[in-house]
Structures are given as C-alpha cells and as structure tokens.
Image (cartoon, helix red, strand yellow):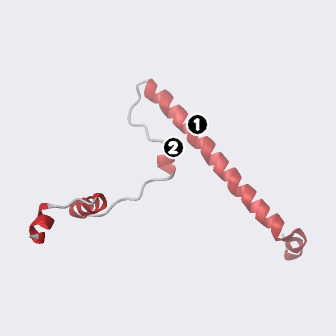
C-alpha cells in the first residue's frame, strides 16, 4: 500500500482496522482457550492426568528467581506480620 492510498483512507480507517484486528485476535484466543479447557476437562474425566491448560502454555508465568528467604520476607511484609527478630529489636 502506498502513502497516497493511506492519505485517502485517513487515520480513522487505519485506527478502525487496527482495532478490528486486535479484537479478532482476542476473540480467537478466547475461543482457543475455551476449546482447550473443554478438551482438558474431557481428558481429565477419562482418567488422564497432568494435563496443562492451553492458556498456561501460551502465557507461562514468569519464573521467580528469588531465594527462599526473600520470598518469606516478601510474604511477611505483605501480610504485615512481625517476626520474633522484629519484636526483640523493638524492646
């Protein structure tokens, strides 16, 4: 497509086309996730085990590279808990 044609179509056409493409992609992904979950439930009902969800495969969770101590400290901080060390330092 050349620039003159884009000028004729205008920015509204381009924005609408882009929005339509994004919506279509989201709709397709939603359908694939639904169908994958349905097939997973059928397989689980037939006795298959250890079957991952399609969504989890295409959107893997980021790996947590923190140490156990860092994770524990984060949980304690988020919950607002006080450790024995905090209590002893406060006295």
Q: Nearer the viewer, residue 41 or 3?
A: 41
Q: Nearer the viewer, residue 77 or 63?
A: 77
Q: State which quarter of the image contains the N terminus.
A: bottom right
37 sits to left or right of 20: left
Image point (47%, 29%), residue name = 43
18 sits to left or right of 26: right
Q: Position of residue 91 (x, y in %)?
A: 8, 70
Q: Which mark is residue 69?
A: none
Numbered disc total: 2
Taking 48 as reference, is 12 above or below it?
Answer: below
Q: Secondary structure at mark 2?
A: helix
Taking 26 as reference, is 50 above or below it?
Answer: above
Taking 5 as reference, is 28 above or below it?
Answer: above
Image point (73%, 59%), residue name = 19
The residue that mark 2 highlights is: 54
Please tell me in which quadrant of the rendered image residue 35 appears.
Answer: top right
Along the polypeptide, which appears first: circle 2 or circle 1? Answer: 1
Image point (31%, 63%), residue name = 65
84 sits to left or right of 47: left
Q: Are marks 2 and 1 in contact (CB under 8 Å)?
A: yes
Q: Position of residue 55 (x, y in %)?
A: 51, 46
Image point (91%, 71%), residue name = 8
Badge 2 crowding class, 10 Å Cα cut-off, few under 14, some 14 to 19, many 20 or more, is some
Please tell me in which quadrant of the rendered image residue 34 appears.
Answer: top right
The residue that mark 1 highlights is: 35
- Tell which residue pokes out farthest to the top in this image: 46
Q: Position of residue 9 (x, y in %)?
A: 88, 68
Q: Position of residue 41 (x, y in %)?
A: 48, 30
Q: Secondary structure at mark 1?
A: helix
Q: What's the distance in space between the residues labelled 2 and 1, CA to CA?
A: 9 Å
């Amino acid at each position: 497509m050349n620039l003159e044609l884009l000028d004729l179509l205008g920015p509204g056409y381009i924005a609408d086309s882009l929005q339509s493409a994004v919506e279509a992609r989201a709709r397709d992904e939603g359908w694939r996730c639904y169908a994958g979950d349905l097939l997973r439930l059928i397989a689980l009902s037939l006795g298959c085990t250890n079957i991952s969800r399609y969504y989890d495969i295409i959107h893997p969770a980021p790996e947590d590279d923190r140490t156990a101590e860092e994770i524990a400290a984060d949980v304690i901080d988020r919950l607002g808990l006080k450790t024995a060390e905090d209590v002893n330092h406060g006295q």
